[in-house]
Amino acid sequence: MVNRMWAVCVVVLALNLGCNIGARAAPQVPCYFIFGDSLVDNGNNNQLQSLARADYLPYGIDFGGPTGRFSNGKTTVDVVAELLGFDDYIPPYATARGQDILKGVNFASAAAGIREETGRQLGGRITFSGQVKNYQNVVSQVVNILGDEDQAANYLSKCIYSVGLGSNDYLNNYFMPQFYSTGNQFTPEEYATSLIQDYSQQLRILYNYGARKIVLFGIGQIGCSPNELAQNSPDGASCVDKINSANQIFNSKLKALANEFNTNLSDARVIFVDSYGIFQDVVTSPAQYGKYKG
């Protein structure tokens, strides 16, 4: 837990905010908006016709019961919300109402990708563009609550925007030839370029609708995920290099995109979080974090 909390402190400190582990204070920002996939979904898929749902046990066993989070307890963004001083977790778009939206909204959806077709074999999900459209709807509500667009723009400029997508565009698209043709249409370099172009388009919409402090999470080492180890690893233990290699190409381009935004948009602050590198020790030395007991 401490290692994870120090990792998310990177986000907070990079935006020149405080990071007091174990301490709670008044929120350091007025709101926190979250875009992503199953890593941070906290209930948006609960009412969808989808295989990508987590509203049943054993999910949430350390959280008091299932919530829609794809974990036993808190997600990374829950910990970030705590570190920022919020007195509760950021509500999912599916249930956020009224004044609640002023502290932020979680738009994340399990199985979501940057590409529209990503994850379709799992059923319903809210793609990145769909999440951005939902955000635009929320902004309209913020304008109505605060009174006018200028006040809303000033308010939103102080908020943090967390964006982390791309994993499904590889695991549930590019490296799934039985359902998708992208692996034959694009080289890894071409595919990453296409993803970043789509990513950039959605980020510009967020910027045009008030986002100024944006955190971009890179893709982790998904070639080392349990599913890939079980299905594609030569020995069931070695990570799948072709997947990790493709992820690194994407991450390199995403980092360059963050730099591009910072250069061209003087009033924006965009940071890239190297998820691939931060958790390198988890992959290379998992024993230090304990053993799984089935």
Image (cartoon, grey):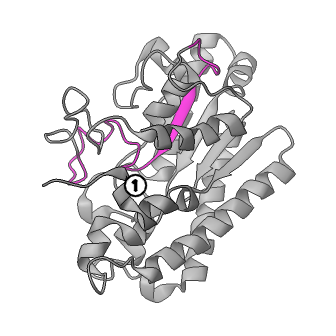
- Residue range in magenta is 25-53
The structure residue drawn at horizontal position 78% and vertical position 56%, both measured from the top left corner, is 259
State which quadrant residue 55 falls in.
Answer: top left
Residue most extreme to the front: 288
Q: Residues within 10 Å of mark 1 (few under 14, many from 20)?
A: many
Percent of width and height locating residue 290: 30, 51
The answer to whether 197 appears left or right of 133 in the picture is right
Q: Quadrant of the C terminus?
A: bottom left
Residue 88 place in picture, x, y as percent = 42, 18
Q: Secondary structure at mark 1?
A: loop
User: Is 183 located above or below residue 278 in the figure?
Assistant: below
The residue carrying mark 1 is 112
As drawn, 242 above or below 98: below
Residue 293 visible, this angle: yes
Q: Nearer the viewer, residue 58 or 31?
A: 58
Q: Residue at x 43, y 84 (%)?
A: 183
Dominant secondary-structure state across the stretch colored magenta? loop
Q: Quadrant of residue 12?
A: top right
258 on left or right of 172: right
Is 21 placed above or below 161 here? above
